[in-house]
Each structure stands twice: as structure tokens, then as C-alpha cells.
Amino acid sequence: MSNPLPARIDVHSHFLPHFYRDALIETGNSHPDGMPAIPPWSPTAHRQIMNTTNVRKSILSISSPGTHLWPSDPAARKSLTRECNAYAANLKSDYPDEFGFWASLPLPNVHDALEEIERAREEGANGFALMTNYHGVYVGDTVLDPVFDRLNELNATVFLHPGAPCIASMNASVGIDDAGATAALPFGNRYPIPIFEFLYDTSRAVINMFYSGTVDRCPNIKFIIPHVGGTLPPLITRFTAFGSLVPGVKPLDGDKVRQQMQDQFYFDLAGTIFDGDTGGRGQLKAFVEGWDISYESLLYGSDFPFTNAGAAEMLANRMRDGLEHLFDEEQRKAIYEGNGRRLLERNMSETRPSSKN
């Protein structure tokens, strides 16, 4: 029987090989980000949920808390990152039509990250999965400029994944051999971090990349922002207009930021973006109608296995019904598969470094 769900490419799904699970347990992350447990995962289980939800291709990545599990051991971070990327590369080699991967980087150590970019590129990475912060060193921090400059030279795709908000220690800010960070969690462990702190940290990271000039300096990078942008959409006007209203705050050109959002940013649909069977109402509708976001900027994401198989299937069905209220058939095909395929066809290649603005 044919699958009743539309064919799709999943840009937001995760893999947890056994050695990564061991590393999570070793570093006290057996309940990652306050979740009940490390979810079970295997290539077989992943291919089964792909079949159930009609996913033609899954782009795998390591989720939070990432591969930078050791605050003061850059060698351990480097080794785990390399092992995870090699595993994903082998999986892609074994199932080239079904799997791709966003490679992790052993940040905040810039030298190691630059080396890993080249290795992962040689192994066929489709792009790179960066966390919003690395022990409190946020994307957009000037210490990470060499990494983003190299990704810009490569026309790379960057999948940004949220993590727990942190405040960097003095040593962490240099990104070499840091001494850890302080968790920035006002509610402590009262709530699992993905409920809302993930969404806030996504916004924090993206806004920092605009204010720091990273987006201006790196026009060749395509960014994938998860969970329909988190809490970013309602903040766009505020962070772009603030500098023109308050002396001493860096002014941003709101029209330019919106154009960059259109040209460089994609948003995946992982999570609870629809309020059940309510005619398409919910987070996605507010985003696309409130901010004139084109269907061409939207991508499918399942967040499997942190969203378990049953929930992934339920959300896929809810998405099918919700998208039918917001987009026509051709637009829905683009969201499910066409936009993702076009993005994956942007093979990384050397380009002349862009001039700094």
C-alpha cells in the first residue's frame, strides 16, 4: 500500500551510536537536558520510522548536549567528534540514498574545529551541525570568526541546534582549554530544558550572529534554524529597531536583516508547530503570516529519536492537515521535499572569501 503521507526529506533527525551513549553516561548526561532518558536509537529503527512517515532521506546530526561534553578536556571533545562524524560518514556510505549528515565540530577549540571541517568535508558531510553555544561561547562570538569564515568560503550549510544556555568562564571565552561554564537556568531542573530554554537559546544565538556581524560577513552560509525559529520571530522587530531608539546600542538595518532572513535562512518544522486539528492554527501560521516568510524557506524535521516513533508519526499526520490549510499542493511539495533537495544540492565548494562589511 502507498504511504498516505507525502514524501519528504528530514533535515532534523539525530543519531546516537553506542559510544556516544557511553560518553553521555560517563559525563553525567544520562538524562540529557533534563529529559527522562537517553532515547533508544539504531539505524534499523531509524529506517523504520522513515518508512512510516515516508521520509526519503534523513540528514543525521548529534543533538544536545553535543560532542563537547568535557569542559576542560579538548582532546576528549576532539576524539568524540571525530568518532561521531566517521560513524555518520560510514552510515551515509552504506545507505547513500537514505542518509546524509551534518558534521559536528569540537568547539570551542577553533584549531581543532578547522581541522575537523576538512576531514568531514572529505568524508562527504552535507554541512555542519553547530550548537547555539559551547560551554557559554555562543555562535557569533569573535573567537569563532575563523570557523565561520572557513564555512563561508565553502558555501556551507549550517544546521543550528539549541542547547542549554550557559555563561562562559573566563578561560572558556578563549576557546582553547576552558574551565567550564555556569548554567543559566533560573528554574534549575524544574523543567526539561527543551520545553522553552531551547527556543530562547536559539533566538539568543541568532540575534548574536546578527549583532556581531557574522551574518554580514558570511553571505555564502545557509543557516537552518530549528523549531520554526524558536522565539526569534516576535523579536525581529525589537532587536533590529532597538539601536535606532536607544543611544549606544549597535543599529541594525531592519530591511537588510529581513532580506538576509529570506536569502540565507531556512526554518525546520520540528516540534509542536500546530495546535492539533485547528485549521492550521499555531506557531507556524503566526510565523509565515506575521512575518511574510516564504514557503521556500521551510523544511521538514522530525527530531527523531528525541521525538519518539509514535509522536513522530502523530506530528507528521498533524502537519499534513495543518499545511493543507496554509499552502497549496505545489508549495507543500516544496516544503516537504523540494526545498531540502535544493539545499542538499548546494555542494560545498571553495569560493573567494567575501569582503568584511
Image: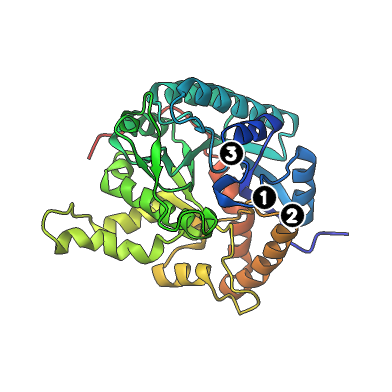
Q: CA distance from mark 3 to mark 2?
A: 18 Å
Can residue 340 be seen from the camera position used here?
A: yes
Query: Residue visible at 44% across and 58% down?
Result: 187
- Residue 238, given in percent of the width and then of the height, sits at 28, 64
Which structural element holds mark 3?
Answer: loop
| Residue assigned mark 3 | 62
From the viewer's perspective, tell me whether residue 340 is left or right of residue 215: right
| Residue assigned mark 2 | 309
- Tell me if mark 2 has few (under 14), some (14-19) or many (20+) residues whose alpha carbon lies within 10 angstroms of its own: many
Nearest to N terminus: mark 1 or mark 2: 1
> Which amino acid is tagged 3?
Ile
Place residue 312 in its image quadrant: bottom right
Which structural element holds mark 2?
Answer: helix
Near-viewer residue (84 or 74):
74
Q: Residue furthest bottom?
A: 278
Q: CA distance from mark 1 to mark 2?
A: 7 Å
Place residue 280 in its image quadrant: bottom right
- Residue 223, given in percent of the width and then of the height, sits at 45, 46
> Which amino acid is tagged 1?
Phe
